[in-house]
Amino acid sequence: MVLEQVETLVAAGYREITLTGVDIGTTAGPGSPHDPRRADLPHRRHARPPVAQALVGAAAYFTRELREVVSGSPVVAPHLHLPLQSGSDRVLRLMRRPYNTRMYRALVESLAGAIPDLGLGTDLIVGHPGERDEDFEATFDLVRELPCSYLHVFAYSDRKGTEAGRLPERVPSRAIRERSRRLRELGREKNLVFRRGMIGRRREVLVLAERDRDTGLHSGLTSNYVEVVFDGPDGLARRFAPVTITGVTAEHTFAALEEATA
């Protein structure tokens, strides 16, 4: 069913397919959580012509089979989103997450070592009930050390009927705001460093339908999920275009369109 949908979208002209879901890195089929069929879909896409990029987002950890496919398939884009939520094992236990920071670090470092120029995003929840100062500092330190290219930072909010909503040790709003500010600032710094590392590199971008509002230039996404802006003729939208990254600011990544395409 999924493969049929992918082929239909590709035939209709779609250039990028996103494979996503809840805990797609864990149980895939009947039986063991390490069922090798977990890697079946991207592996079968690997066997077909690379007519589209496949952007794979995933949850806490992958099976060995899925890691091998993601790091070796020419149709899987070098962009992964791996939610961490907290860098404190104590808080992860409160959240009932099925992983710990050692497992997460090992996965991320393995993927970053196997996938050149990997764009890696993560989710973080700030202020979960029971999160103490030392828990937050553990999160901050871990994220600072990991090769993340961007962060999604969320302030904890109660949800009626949830286990977390009944936990004691509520984190004051002021502390949540300050912790969120620090993580978001760290995320901006890491993203800037990641984009600076792309200067002078040739990348193929998927040109978006709308031009960048601030600059009026074309806007496109690299396979590792960096939005770049560049000058060029009309008619490039929804096409792949080769560019060279020329510079970055806090807000933009600039590129030059290759002359043959222009």
Image (cartoon, helix red, strand yellow):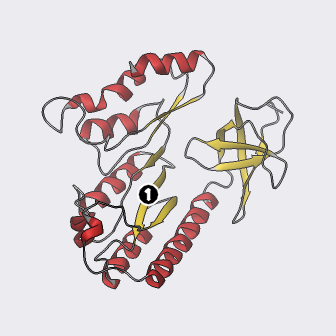
- Residue 164 image offset from top left, x and y in percent: 28, 66
Vertical arrangement, residue 74 with respect to residue 111, above or below: above
- Circle 1: residue type: Thr
Is 244 or 47 nearer to us in this picture?
47
- Secondary structure category for the residue under label 1: strand
Q: Residues within 10 Å of mark 1 (few under 14, many from 20)?
A: many
For the question of whether residue 34 can be seen, the reply is: yes
- Residue 108 image offset from top left, x and y in percent: 36, 55
Q: Residue furthest left?
A: 31
Q: Residue at x 57, y 47 (%)?
A: 225
- Residue 32 image offset from top left, x and y in percent: 13, 35
Q: Is residue 121 left or right of residue 111?
A: right
Which quadrant of the figure contains the C terminus? top right
- Residue 201 image offset from top left, x and y in percent: 65, 48
Which quadrant of the figure contains the N terminus? top left
Determine which residue is flagged by label 1.
122
